Amino acid sequence: MYLERIDGPQDVKALDRAQRVELAREMRAALIEKLSAHGGHFGPNLGMVEATIALHVVFDSPRDKMVFDVSHQTYAHKMLTGRKQAFLSSDAYDDVTGYSAPQESAHDFFTIGHTSTSISLACGMAKARDLVGGKENIVAIIGDGSLSGGEAMEGLDYAAELRGNLIVVVNDNDMSIAENHGGLYENLRALRESGGKCENNLFRAFGLDYVFVADGNDIDALIQAFERVKDTDHPTVVHICTQKGKGYAPAERDKERWHYCAPFDRETGKPRFAQSGEDYGELTAQWLLDKMQTDPRVVAITSGTPGVFGFDKDKRDRAGAQFVDVGIAEEHAVAMASGIATNGGKPVYGVYSTFLQRAYDQLAQDVCINGSPVTILVYAASVYGMNDVTHLGIFDIPMISNIPGLVYLAPTCKEQYLSMLHWAIDQNEHPVAIRVPADGVVASGQSESTDWGQLNRYRVVRRGGKVAILALGSFFGLGMRVAQALERQTGVAPTLIDPIYITGTDTKLLDALTSDHDIVVTLEDGVIDGGFGEKIARYYGAHPTMRVLNYGLRKQFLDRYDVEQVLRDNRLTPRQIVQDVLALN
C-alpha cells in the first residue's frame, strides 16, 4: 500500500502519476472502511481525495498554508499530513477530530467547524504575510455550498484588495448538504456548462483572476492548474468540479443522505443502528405540513439544513413555495423571517443551536427590536447534542434569553411542544423561540390547552416543602429523579416546578415559595453563566433566608466529551445534587 508509507506531503510529492492514482484509490477505500464503522462526513471527503493529493504535490505545506472551509473535507488532508493511522487502524479512529485541528498538526491552522469562514481567514493570513515580507502561498479551500454564506461573499469582496498571492479553491459539486439555492448557483452552472468561459463570471466580477478545472477528480489536471497559480502575485480563484460521494455508489446517487453518515453496512448502505421511536424533527415537519394545508401564510425556513426539522426531499416538494432554503446563510434566514412576519406571513425557522449564534445581530435587531412574531425552533440545544468543540449547543440560553422582547420556551414533552408551536405561529405579539427537547420524545399522555401568551407562569408539578426544584426543559427528568431521591432520604417531598419560560421569572410563585421553602435548586441543560438559574438567584439575592443552588454547565469549550463524565464534573447527578442540598440543612 502507498498510503501506509505516507508520513507527510514530501512522500506524496515523490510518487509518480500511476502511484498517485493508486494512492487515491487506497485513500477512498480507507475512508469508506472507517466511516462505515465510525460515522462522519462522508460525501464531502470522498469527493476531495484527488484535489487534496494535487494540493500536496504542488504546494509546500505547512510553509504554504491551506485553510479548509467548514473542514468537512479535511479527512484526506489529515491522511497525507502524518495522521494516516487514524484512518487505517480502528484503535486509532478517535485519535483525530472530524475537523481542522491545530493541536493535531502543524499543517492545520484553525479549529473550524462553521461554514463560509475560510476566505476571510486566508485574507488575514495573506495580509500578515505581506506585512512581514513573507513569500508563502495562502490557499483557501471552500465548497460551493459555503459560498452562500455572507462571510464568504465578504471575503471574496475584500480579496481583490490584496496585492499579493491568495488562491481560493472553489470545490463545486453542485450540492450543499441538500441542493443549492440562490442566484449565484445559476452562475456556477453556467461556468460549468461553458467550461469556465461564459461571459458572466461571479469571481471575475469581484476583481479576481480565474482558472477552471472541468474534472476536479483528475489529479493531473488539478496539478497543472495549481502549478499555474502557485507563487502568483495576485488573488486567483481555481474553480474545480468534483463529484460528491465519489467511489461509493449509494453516496453518488443520494448526495443529501450521504453528506454525513452514522455507521453503516458497506455492502447495503443501510445504517447499523436503526433509529426507533418518534423524532422531534419528523414530528415538526408533519405538523407544519398539516398546518400549511389550512393556512397558506405558514412558511418553513432553513439555512441549508432542512433535515433539522424533518424536511426531506419528499416533504420539501409537498410544501412547495411554503418551504424556503436560503442556503447556509443564517443571518439572511432570520432577517427574512422578520420580513415575512411583518408583511402578514407566519415564518417558522428551524435551526441547530450552534448555528443560531451566527445570526445574533439579526435576532436582536431585525426581529426583537421590531417585535416581529417570528417562530424559531432551536434544535440540539443540550449537553446531549453534538459534542465537537465547533458544534456545541450549550450556549443558547445566555446568548438569546437576555434579548428584550423575545419569549424563549422550554417544553418538557411532546404535548407541550406542539401546543407551544401552535400558539407561537398563530399569535402576533412576540418573537418566540422554542428550545426543542433534546432527550428524545417524551409523551405525557395529557392534552395541553395552556395559553402560553400568559407569560412567565411557571407550572407547579408537585407541591411539597422546604426544597423547590426548578427543572428546565430537557433537565426536567433530572429534576424528577432529584425530587425522588430527596424524598427517600429526608422523608419530605420537595416542590417540583416546570419553569417553561426561559426568558422571564414568575415573581408571584417565587414570592410564594418563601413562606415554606428555604432552598431553591435550578437545573438547566446549558452553560450556567448568564443563564436561567442566575435569574432566580438574582431575584432571591436580598432575601434573608432563601438559599439558591444553580446547576448547569461550566463556561468552557468542551470537545468530543463523554456526557456522563461532564454531568459528574458539573455535579449534575441526582446523588451529587442531593448531597449539596443536604449540606445546606
Image (cartoon, rainbow, N blue to C red):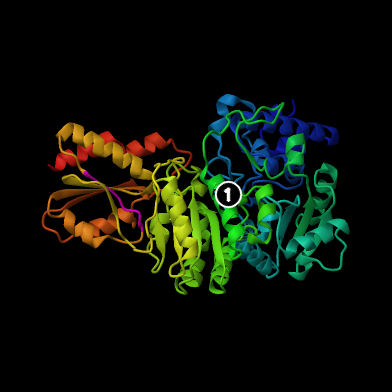
Q: Which residues are magenta?
A: 495-502
Q: Amino acid at mark 1?
A: Gln
- Say whether residue 515 is magenta: no
Q: Residue at x 72, y 57 (%)?
A: 167
Q: Where is residue 221 drawn, in percent x and y? A: 85, 47
Q: Is residue 571 visible?
A: no
Q: Is residue 65 above or below residue 428?
A: above
Q: Position of residue 418 (x, y in %)?
A: 47, 51
Q: Say if the magenta span includes residue 499.
A: yes
Which quarter of the rendered picture does the N terminus lie within?
A: top right
Q: Which residue is depicted at the point 66% across and 68% down? A: 158
Q: Quadrant of residue 39?
A: top right
Q: Which residue is mark 1?
A: 286
Which residue is nearer to you in this view: 491 or 482?
A: 491
In screen coordinates, is 181 left or right of 470? right
Is residue 499 among what the camera can see?
Answer: yes
Whole-percent x and y of residue 70? 61, 50
Task: Pick whichever, 527 or 16, lies toward us.
Answer: 527
Q: Nearer the viewer, residue 139 or 585?
A: 585
Badge 1 marks a residue whose secondary structure is: helix
Left or right of residue 225: residue 310: left
Q: Quadrant of the C terminus?
A: top left
Q: Residue at x 51, y 48 (%)?
A: 391
